[in-house]
Image: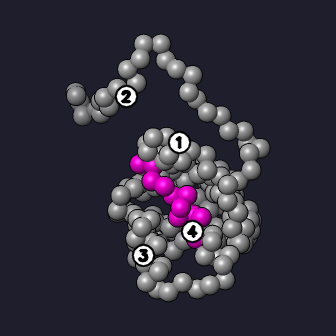
């Protein structure tokens, strides 16, 4: 390594000619999850489908305010790329009105949050590295919202711990 630059990781694929292994997902694919609050989550690439390298999700909201409170993760990074609309992004010290093309990277332990408070639909990409099984988190929250049952504080704490989510 010279000049402080990062070198490539060790090769994973050791074949000679490459393989036909890419996967394509058309924009017309239905979202995997629709919540009571109107959020549609598209599982573009899960940790399982990327061999644990990353998870990439498209998060589409309607005009109603929605999004988590400030929190952090111990084991994963999270990145946000605003596709359309205005998404409020919290960088741990202040809220920023993220617009189409804006990006926020949050390393492990970084306090963050996001909310659509614009009164208009918004859409963003959420990237987790490594590829933790965030589908279980999204689906679990949706099930809690649809069930009408209010879980106990202990049940919710256990749920958040299993999904590497710590509230501030």
Residue marked by disc 2: 12
Compared with 3, 53 (above or below) is below
Image disc number at residue 68:
none
Q: Residue placed farthest to the left in the image?
A: 2
Classify mark 2: residues with Cα within 10 Å, few (<14), some (14-19) or many (20+): few
Q: Residue at x 48, y 55 (%)?
A: 133
Residue marked by disc 4: 140
Q: Position of residue 149 (x, y in %)?
A: 62, 84
Tag 3's secondary structure? helix
Say which quadrant the N terminus sits in. top left
Of marks 1 and 4, which one's residue comes earlier in the chain? 1
Foreground pick, 149 / 43: 149
The stretch in magenta equals: 130-141
Q: Main secondary structure of the magenta part?
A: helix
Of marks 1 and 2, which one's residue comes earlier in the chain? 2
Using the numbered discs, state the Cα–Cα distance from disc 3 to disc 1 in whole angstroms.
26 Å
Residue marked by disc 1: 49
């Amino acid at each position: 390594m010279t000049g402080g630059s990062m070198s490539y990781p060790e090769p994973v694929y050791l074949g000679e000619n490459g393989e036909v292994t890419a996967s394509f997902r058309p924009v017309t694919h239905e979202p995997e999850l629709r919540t009571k609050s109107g959020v549609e989550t598209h599982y573009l690439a899960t940790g399982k489908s990327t061999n644990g390298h990353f998870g990439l999700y498209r998060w589409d909201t309607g005009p109603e305010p929605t999004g988590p409170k400030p929190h952090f993760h111990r084991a994963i990074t999270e990145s946000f790329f605003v596709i359309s609309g205005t998404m409020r992004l919290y960088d741990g010290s202040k809220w920023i009105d993220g617009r189409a093309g804006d990006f926020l990277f949050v390393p492990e332990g970084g306090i963050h949050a996001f909310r659509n408070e614009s009164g208009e639909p918004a859409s963003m990409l959420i990237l987790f590295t490594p590829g933790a099984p965030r589908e279980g988190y999204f689906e679990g929250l949706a099930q809690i919202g649809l069930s009408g049952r209010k879980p106990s504080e202990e049940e919710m704490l256990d749920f958040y711990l299993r999904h590497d989510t710590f509230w501030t």
